[in-house]
Image: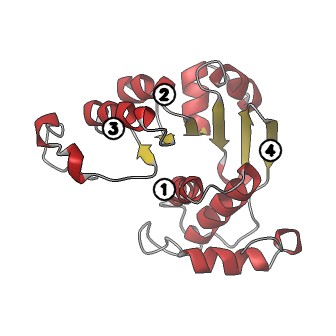
Amino acid sequence: MNYTEPKTEFPLDDIQNHQISTKVVLVDGHEPEVSLYFLKEAKKHGIPTLLDAGSVHRRTQLLLPEVNHLICSEKFAQDFTGESNAQLALDKLYHHNRSVIITCGEDGLIWKNELGNGELPAFSINAVDTTGAGDAFHGAFAACLVRQKTWEYSLKFSRAAAALCCTHLGGRSGLPTQEQVLAFLQNFPQNAEFD
């Protein structure tokens, strides 16, 4: 949902909940009141939720403890925790949310949840524009939640979507399709299990 009315937030009175059917809720802090509303509804119905946290502000801080998964930039992690070391920031963020992924650009990502913790490198690509890479990652991860994919699959698929996005100019024009992500992953022998 994108609400572009200047200097106002989406009015809660305009929500017609009976017309909304969803399998995942992805929020980014731009509409905190409506986001909180949907997060509460999602929790009632067991719908997974995630926060795209790019920078620290009141709205992302408000939403952070309300989501199932926190996916944040390294900048957010450092600014929120005061830690310059990403691993130390991850440990501190884990006290606020039990499923944390910190995306670190060309350095890949680190994660921690109740399954454990780990790090994964970025795919080696010829990047021409990083605009939209974070959005590609978040959208792909949300799609994996809908499809009830494993944690490992979700991280690989999302990393691949972000990498592919960086190979094109422009955020929206660079967003890959599922088929493009799967074809990209087939070029890596360790990813043969992708379908």
Who comes first in sequence, dot 3 or dot 4? 3
When the figure is inspected, residue 38 is found, relative to residue 141, above or below; the finding is above
Find numbered disc 3 in the image and state the secondary structure of the residue it sits on.
helix
- Please tell me which residue is depicted at 82% across the width and 70% down the height of the picture: 191
Find numbered disc 2 in the image and state the secondary structure of the residue it sits on.
helix
Question: How far apart are the two marked residues, 4 and 1, measured between alpha carbons?
Answer: 20 Å
Q: Amino acid at mark 3?
A: Phe
- Figure disc tally: 4
Mark 3 surroundings within 10 Å by alpha-carbon count, few (fewer than 14), some (14 through 19), many (20 or more): some
Question: How far apart are the two marked residues, 2 and 3, measured between alpha carbons?
Answer: 14 Å
Who comes first in sequence, dot 2 or dot 4? 2
Read off the residue under disc 4.
119
Read off the residue under disc 1.
135
- Residue 38, numbered label: 3
Q: Single out the mark in the foreground, 2 or 3.
A: 3
Question: Residue 187 occupies which quadrant of the picture?
Answer: bottom right
